[in-house]
Every structure is written in C-alpha cells, then in structure tokens.
Amino acid sequence: MAKKIQAIRGMNDILPSQSPVWQYLEGTVKEVLAGYGYDEIRMPVLEQTALFKRSIGEVTDIVEKEMYTFEDRNGDSLTLRPEGTASCVRACEEHGLLYNQTQRLWYTGPMFRHERPQKGRYRQFYQIGVETFGIATPDIDAELILMTARLWEQLGLAESVTLQLNTLGSNEARARYRDALVEYLSARKDQLDEDSQRRLETNPLRVLDSKNPETQALLADAPELHDYLDDESRDDFASLRTVLDAAGVKYEINQRLVRGLDYYCKTVFEWVTDKLGAQGTVCAGGRYDGLVEQLGGKATPAVGFAMGVERLILMLETLEVIPQEVMQTVDVYVCGVGEGASLASLMLADGLRAEQPWLRIQTHCGGGSFKSQMKKADKSGASFALLLGESEIAEQQVTVKDLRGDTGQQTLAQQELGQWLAAHLN
C-alpha cells in the first residue's frame, strides 16, 4: 500500500467543523472595517526576496532564519511572504496609489515563516492587516487603535486584552537612542544571554524584548528611550493619548515595546492577553513613515497593524464567547420518501431559497427511510425538518417538524412555508 501523504508540519487544514468560527471572525472584522471606510486589497503570496530583505532588514530573525526562499526556474529568488506590509507597499507603489493620495486599506490571507510550530503559532498562518498611507498626523494612529478597540467589543474580547503603547521617535531619535543603548550594553556584554549578545551586534533594540530575567534586570538601569525623543514625536504621542483618553481606551505605556521590524518609527502598539497561558500578542502595529521611500517610492507617511487569526480564534474558543448561532450552518433540512420525493424536495428547497435568500437549506440526497433521514436532519444542526411524502407531494403540502424546540409537528401548504419559516427563524 502506498504511503499516505500528510500535510507539511506547521501547515494545517481548516476543517468544516472549524470554518464557521473563521467565517464569524473574518465577517466581524470586515463589518468593523467597512464601518470606518477601509477598502480591501489582495496581494500575491510570492514576492521577490529583495522586497523583504530591504523592508524587514537583512539582520532580523525573519530574514536570517524564517523565510521560505527558493530560486524559480528562471533563477529568480522568490519568497513566500512572511508578513503583509511590505507586499502592500509594493502593490500600492507599483499601481500608483500613493503619490499625493491617501489610502485606507486592509487585506487577509496566509503568511509563511519557518518557526517551531506551537499552539496558535504555525508555519503557514493567517493574518488580517490594515495599512494607511498619506496621513502624517496622529489622528490616524488613534483611529486604528479605536478601530481595534471596537473590534474587541464586537467579539466579546474587550475585557481580556490590554493595550501597550510606545513611541520610538523619529528615525534620527531612534538612531541616537540605539547608540546610547549599544554603549550601555556593550560594557555589560558578558552579562547578556546568548541571544541578546547576538542581537546587540545586529538589532540592538530587540534586546529590550528579551524574556531572559537576568537581561531584563540589567535593562533596569539602561538609557530610557523617551529621553531621546524629538519634539515632534513627543507632541504626536501626547495628541494620540489625548484621543485615547477622551474615548475611554485604557492603555499602558511600555518603553521597551519596540516591535521586531526595522521599519517602525514614532507610534508602536500591541494588544496583549494573558488568557492563552504566557502573555501573548494578538494584534500589533505602528507607524512606518520611511518604508515607502526605502522601497523606491517618494516619502509617504504610513501606519498600520496586523492581527493573527489563529490566535484570535483560540481566544474566542478559550473564553467561550462564540455566539451559539455561529456553529449552526443549516436552518432547514428537507427530507423526502416515496415516488417523486427527490425531485419534489429539490424543487421545494430551491423555491424557498428564491423566496427567502437568507435561508440555509440542506436537501437530503441519496435516498433512505424517513428514520435514517431524520437522523441526518438532527445531525445537521437544522432547526426544522421539512418532510415530503407521497400525500404531501400530491396535495402541495409539507410537514414541518421542530428539531430543537417544543412546537412539535404540523402540516402547511407549501406556498405558506416561506413566510412561516421567516416568522419562526428570525
């Protein structure tokens, strides 16, 4: 017997029992984004490798260790996208969407990183990203945070996430702080953990993210980022906080929040939770005013965020805040036995769909007794079973059986059925 082929480790199937939750999350996000006037953009999953090396930074963990990169048949180096921002910038610049324009965009889809798979973190993972271009003022930073806060309310997660906020200052201010931090840490290099020693040479601000207790203790006396901020960044950060305070959005200022990618400046933020074990990030973003120019375009202010779909779904399931109706994918199950039952069932179901387009109707196919069909009707999760026997077919009637409530069973004229279902299902 041939060996069975299985999915690649860390690249998972989303099964029919799981997809309703995905659809619920994605649908809720789309509704919130539509409420703020954001437009969808779709980018390819494959890009030139140079795009990510230039945007993310060649000495980041993503580029050095995690990207799926290969040469195609033309000898070009291609990479499965590890994140969406660089692809979005590339697409907007390529199609002339940036110069002297503002854009509010969102996208969703798979990203790819060769990491050690663990719960909520996979090698093929899904993100929902939001990017805005052409707006330099902090009101757009505030809008993005208010948007995410509204999403948590809609999903029932508001009490389970905490907003962490910081500003990195201008690129020049960040560079000055970087030099001061390197000087401080270099004098204590032998006290750093191995990973932080490596980061000190390649991406020193990432040392601030270290989970090593000894390194964190060492950082207690390190230079403070906010001591190196430029006036404009201070003013923008104060304006952002004013809006959040007025809106009642609670936050914690975390000066060690620097984000892992090289292109961030000024505002950075993360929504974190402790409901999945160790504290984890469920949504993160910030301002990246220099990235468009870095990728060959004209200087364009930009800010955005991304959220991990798998991690949000894990939260919804862990906190048991998925509405019960989300898992019900069928409203009505049509059963038929006897001569002409198959044709009559299909015609009845299609007539109902035309009259009540919102109805989710599953028609039994494959024959079998009423008893066996009723078992499948119950398993489908439908609220009602519609029964068609030879007498119902002859008299243009249908028997309706309540599968979930206590209204029992009754026979209706087929022409009355659509209105009856509308009254009892809405």
Image (cartoon, rainbow, N blue to C red):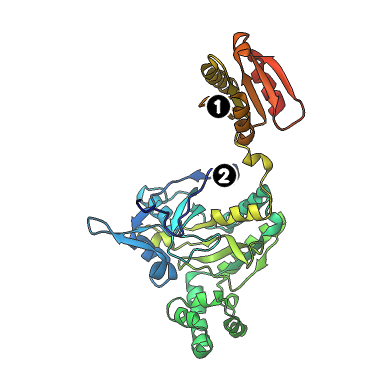
Residue that lies at the very extreme toward the left in this rendered image: 74
Against 311, residue 402 (above or below) is: above
Task: Check residue 364 in the rendering and tell me which mark sits there, or answer none.
Answer: 1
Across and down, in percent, residue 240 comes to: 63, 60
Taking depth in this image into account, of 230 and 86 the one nearest to the observer is: 86
Q: Are marks 1 and 2 in contact (CB under 8 Å)?
A: no
Type of the residue with mark 1: His
Task: Check residue 100 in the rendering and tell me which mark sits there, or answer none.
Answer: none
Specify the quadrant of the image occupied by residue 352.
top right
For image coordinates 53% across by 20% down, the residue present is 346
The residue that mark 2 highlights is 17
| Marked residue nearer the N-terminal end (1 or 2) | 2
Q: CA–CA distance between discs 1 and 2?
A: 19 Å
Q: Nearer the viewer, mark 1 or mark 2?
A: 1
Across and down, in percent, residue 166 comes to: 60, 68
Against 215, residue 260 (above or below) is: above
Taking depth in this image into account, of 279 and 414 the one nearest to the observer is: 414
